[in-house]
Amino acid sequence: MLLSDGRFVIAYCSNNLCWITRRAPFGKATLLDQDIEIDFQQQTTPDDVVTVIATQPMTTNETWNRIAPGEFALFHFGERLALG
């Protein structure tokens, strides 16, 4: 479950949930299910913080964090504040 007010995002995991936070210097990411590489440096500024939350990791060359079933993560403008 994801719940947001536009500034904060709460992600609650019932069975499968993971996240990754990207910040400058942004690199390239290779998608898991297609032969595509994305250069995030072309799409972002040095001040951006980007967090992606998904049920499974979406890229092969990055380290994703898992949220355990029954736990949550709280994010504020892309930065993780709490995990519990």
Image (cartoon, rainbow, N blue to C red):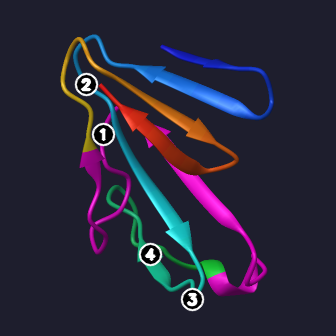
Q: Which residue is mark 3?
A: 25
Q: Secondary structure at mark 3?
A: loop
- Name the residue type under label 2: Asn
Q: Which residue is mark 2?
A: 16
Asked if 27 appears above or below 60 in the picture, the reply is below
Q: Secondary structure at mark 4?
A: strand
Asked if 9 appears above or below 66 in the picture, the reply is above
Disc 3 crowd rating (10 Å Cα; few below 14, some 14-19, many 20+) is few
Q: Which residue is mark 1?
A: 56
Q: Position of residue 65 (x, y in %)?
A: 27, 49
Q: Nearer the viewer, mark 1 or mark 3?
A: 3
Residue segment shown in magenta: 41-65
Question: Does the CB distance between marks 1 and 2 fall below 8 Å?
Answer: yes
Locate residue 33: give its quadrant: bottom left
Instruction: State the residue at coordinates (49%, 41%).
Output: 81
* Quadrant of the snapshot with the C terminus: top left
Q: Nearer the viewer, mark 3 or mark 2?
A: 3
Q: Which residue is mark 4?
A: 29
Locate residue 13 relative to residue 3 in the image: left or right: left
Instruction: State the residue at coordinates (72%, 69%).
Output: 48
Disc 4 to disc 1, C-alpha distance:
15 Å
Asked if 65 appears above or below 74 in the picture, the reply is below
Q: Position of residue 78 (x, y in %)?
A: 62, 50
Mark 3 or 2, nearer chain start: 2
Asked if 9 appears above or below 14 in the picture, the reply is below
